[in-house]
Amino acid sequence: MTLLTDKPRDHVDPQSTVGAAPEESRAARLTSFEVSDFPVPNGREEEWRFTPVDRLGGVFADEGDDDREGDYAADYDVSGVMDVIAQTALAPGQAPRGTVLVPGDRGAVVASKHTTEALHLKLEAEKEYAEPLRVNVHGNGAGRLSSAHYVVEAGHHSKALLILDHTGSADHRGNLEVIVGDGAELTVVSLQRWDDDAVHLGQHDAQVGRDATYKHIAVSLGGSIVRVNANVNYQGPGGDATLLGVYFADAGQHLEHRSFVDHNEPHTNSLVTYKGALQGDGAHTVWVGDVLIRKEAEGIDTYELNRNLVLTDGARADSVPNLEIETGEIAGAGHASSTGRFDDEQLFYLMSRGIDETNARRLVVRGFFADIIAKIGVPEVVDTLMAAIEEELAADMGASA
Amino acid sequence: MTTLEIRDLHVSVETDTGAKEILRGVDLTINSGETHAIMGPNGSGKSTLAYAIAGHPKYTVTGGTITLDGEDVLEMAVDERAKAGLFLAMQYPVEVPGVTVSNFLRTAKTSIDGEAPKLRTWVKDMKGAMEALRMDSHFAERNVNEGFSGGEKKRHEILQMELLQPQIAVLDETDSGLDVDALKVVAEGVNRVKENTGLGVMLITHYTRILRYIQPDHVHVFVAGKVAESGGPELANRLEDEGYDRYVQAAAV
Ligand SMILES: Nc1ncnc2c1ncn2[C@@H]1O[C@H](COP(=O)(O)OP(=O)(O)OP(=O)(O)O)[C@@H](O)[C@H]1O
Ligand SMILES: [Mg+2]
C-alpha cells in the first residue's frame, strides 16, 4: 500500500494489497554468510524497492570500519552491561554467534563479515535484572563506515531490559542476535536518535524459547536513512513475541521498518504494532510486516497493525502487511494497516473549545501515539519518546509560522 | 449582558463544481438569557449557520457581519471565538483517539480561563456536572467521543458547555438521537446553565418536542438559507401542525 499525500487520498484499504500473496514464500528467502550472495542492491529488488539505495553510499561496502588512530568510526559505551559481558568476544562462526542470525541482505552480510569481535551478553538463568542493561553507540562522523554485531543470550527464566541507544553519525550496519531461553522475559529497545546525516541498517533476529516472552521495540527519530528489520522465530511452543515500533519522520528522512514473524512452532503468539507520524517535504516511512504461519504451527495467534499519521503535504508512507498461512488450525490471525492525514475536523473541534492550534495539534498527535506508548511500558523510553515528539512538533510549528 | 448580532450573513461552501451559496442574508440578534429556536427543513443551512458562527474553515463568509458585543467575530480564529464566549454543541461531535475526556476538558478549561483550574474544585465541578447529566464517571477516562452512542455524544457536548460557561451557545440538533429520558436530562442541563449564568441560546431543531422542556422566547423559521419568519413560541406549534411546505414553496417561487 502506498499513500502519496499530494494526491487527495485519505485512506487506503489494506485489504486491497493483502489478498495478493507475496510472489514467493517468505520461507524461501535467501540467507547466507557469503557476501557474494548479496550483490549491492540497485533498488529494483522486491526487498529494496522502497529504499533510496542511491543515497545509501558506502554502507554496503565490503570493507572494514573507518577507524583511525585513536579515533574510531563509532564508540561503544558498555558500562551499562559490565555485569553481563562474556569473557571472550565472538568471532564470525563462533557459536552461539550465527545460530540464530544468518544475514538476509547486503547490509547484514557485510556487518557480519566485518565485525570480527561480536559483543556477547549472557544473562544469568533465573536472574531478574532490576536495572536496564544499556549499550550506547555513538557515531563519530557522517559517512564513516561502522559495523556491529551483538549476541544476547538470555538464560532460562531470566528477566531483563536491554537498551541499544544510537546517537551521533556514521554509516552504520548493525546485527543483533538474540536467544531468549525457555521461560525468559526479555525486552530489547533499539533507539535511533542519530544526527540528520546518519545511515543505519540493522538486522535484529531473535529466537524465542519455550514459554518465553520477547519484546522488541524500535524507536526511530533521527538519521537520514534508517532501516531496521526485526525478525522472530520460536524454539518451542508457548513463546510470545511483541514487536513494536514508533517513528517520526521529517523532511527528507527515510525511516523503514520491516518485521518477520516465523510461526514455526505450535501455540505461539505474536503481536506486531508500528505507528508513525510524518511531516515535511520528502518525509518517507516504510513498514513491511511479514507473518508466516507454518503447517506445524497449530493453535497460534497473531495480529499485526501499522498506522501512519501524515501531518503535512509531500510526505509519503508505505505500508505492506503480508500474511502467509499454511495451516487452518489457528486461534487467530489478523492485520490492519492505514495511513491518514491529520484530521482538520479534530483540529476544529478542539479549537472550538478554546484550545489554540499548537496545543490542539499536540493533543491529536500525542493521542495518536497514546496506545502504543502504553504498550511500550518502559518509563525511560517513553520519556525520551515524548520529549522527542514534543520537539518535532515544536520544530514544525516554528517552520509553519 | 452579551449580544450576538448577525447581519445579512452570506456564506458559501467550496464544492467540486465551485463555490455554492448556502446562507443568503441571515439576520438574527441573540441576547443573554434569551432562547431562540431555529427550525427548518433538512438542508436549509442551519448547521452552516452554526459552523459559520464557530469559524469552521470549510465555510466562507462572502458578506454580512457577526459581532459579539460589537467585536468582530469574523476576525477571530476559532479558539478566540470560544474564548470570547461562544460555544457550539455540534450535530456530529468528532472523535479524538487517544485523548481522554478529562484531559480534553481540563485543557479546554485552562485555555478559556487563561489559567489552570484549581485541581480540587475542578474535580468536584467535573464530577458534579457529569452526575447531573447522568454520565457515568468512567467517561472521564474514555477517549473523546470514541465509541460514544449518539446520546452520549450529545450529553458530552452539554457537559462541556456546563464546564466552559460560555455567554452564547449554539446547540445544533442536540435533541436528535435522544430518547425522552435523555432529552429531559439534557434539557435540564441547558436550563441549569441558563439559570446559573444567563446563557443566551440558539437552539437548532427539527422538532418541537425539545421545546416542551426548554422554553423558547423566539422561534425562527429557517428556509433556503435565511430566516423566513419569526415569532413567539406559538409559531413552533403552528410548524408542528403545518410543516414547512408553505415556506418551502414560497422560497422556491
Ligand atoms: N461541504 C459541502 N459541500 C457541498 N455542499 C454542502 C457542504 N456543506 C453543506 N452543503 C450543503 O449545504 C446545504 C445546507 O447544509 P446544512 O448542513 O447547513 O443543512 P441543515 O439545515 O443543517 O440540514 P439538516 O437538518 O439535515 O442538519 C445542504 O444542501 C448541503 O448539502
Ligand atoms: Mg444540520
Image (spheres, coloured by chain):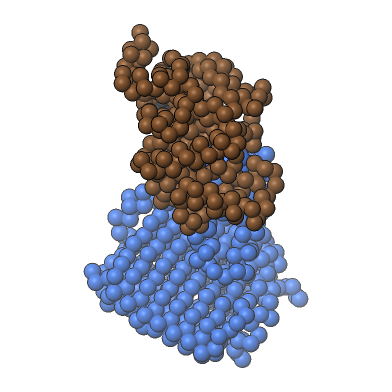
Q: Where is residue B150 in the image (x, y as percent from the top left)?
A: 39, 44
Q: Which sits in the foreground, B191 or A239?
A: B191
Q: In which quarter of the image is residue A111?
A: bottom right
Find residue B169 and report its horizontal and vertical position in percent.
Answer: 54, 33
Residue A284, how many percent across, how many down?
53, 51
Per the rendering, the colour in which chain A appears is blue
| Image position, residue A184 (x, y; %) | 47, 83
Relative to A117, A285 lies left or right: left
| Left or right: residue A13 compared with residue B194 | left
User: Is residue A250 shown to the viewer in this render?
Assistant: no
Quarter of the figure with residue B199: top right
Q: In this view, does A331 lie above or below A180?
A: above
B127 is higher (above) or lower (below) than A399: below
* Residue located at (45% from left, 17% from top): B231
Identity of the residue furthest to the left in this view: A328
Q: Residue at x 43, y 81 (%)?
A: A212
- Numbered label tally: 0
Which residue is pictured at 52% across the width and 83% down the height?
Answer: A159
Q: Which of A372 and A8 is in front in this view?
A: A372
Relative to A294, is B73 above or below? Answer: above
Output the letter for the chain in brown: B
Against B202, is A315 above or below?
below
Residue located 62% across and 69% down the image: A380
